Amino acid sequence: MTYDGETRSRVLTNLGEKISSIFSDRSNPIGAVVGFFKDMFSRWKFDALTLTIVLVTLVFILVGVVSLVRRAIQHRRRLAALQLTKLPHAQRRGLVARLRFYLQMLDMLERHGHRRPPAQSPMHFAESLVESHPGRFMPVVDLTHEFYEIRFGLRSLDDERRDRIRDLMKSLEDQLLAKKVQSPAS
């Protein structure tokens, strides 16, 4: 009826002994796995070179896994920036190729400290840039219009549109670089 300190201590001691016996008894699956790993490390005698090679290999594997995860997250973020997350895979692939200019524009802006918040629409982002820096970011508004026409208006990326986008990208790059050159002298 009572659960005092002595009873609690006795229960915890019994529980600890039971867990210890499970881990040390090789006839059950848990004990067999624990025993395997204990034996493995005691059987393998690593010299310094072998241990270094194993550790370097593990580091490369870890870097590779982290790189793959980072790439998957970045890919998902890019699809969200293009507002393509809800489209079927086949339709998404064609749009990604045609909308690559918009991702390049976002990358260019990010390198200069202007990141679009995920919750902000592309047009609202473009307009907020123009409001904060009149004239400087007009190419962003025009490129965003092109983005909307291709993404939602299902317009093709013909030669004329491609040339217009290329000119707008060059204009934006020139504006960003001009500001960067002027900044240190100010």
Image (cartoon, rainbow, N blue to C red):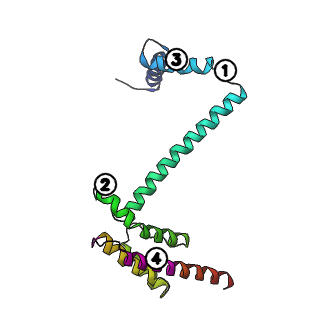
Q: Are circles 1 and 3 on residues that touch, CB within 8 Å?
A: no
| Residue designated by label 1 | 45
Up the image or down, 76 lies above or below 53; here it is below
The mark lying in front, picked from 3 and 4, is 4
Q: Which residue is mark 3?
A: 35
Q: CA distance from mark 2 to mark 3?
A: 47 Å
The C terminus lies in which quarter of the figure? bottom right
What's under tag 2, amino acid-wise? Answer: His
Q: Is residue 10 above or below residue 127?
A: above
Task: Please tell me the numbered disc located at residue 89.
Answer: 2
Judged by its main secondary structure, the magenta piece is helix
State left or right for residue 56 relative to residue 66.
Answer: right
In the rendered structure, which segment of residues is drawn in magenta? 152-172
Q: Which residue is mark 4?
A: 166
**Amino acid type, mark 4:** Arg
Earlier in the chain: of badge 1 and badge 2, it is 1
Quarter of image, res 131: bottom left
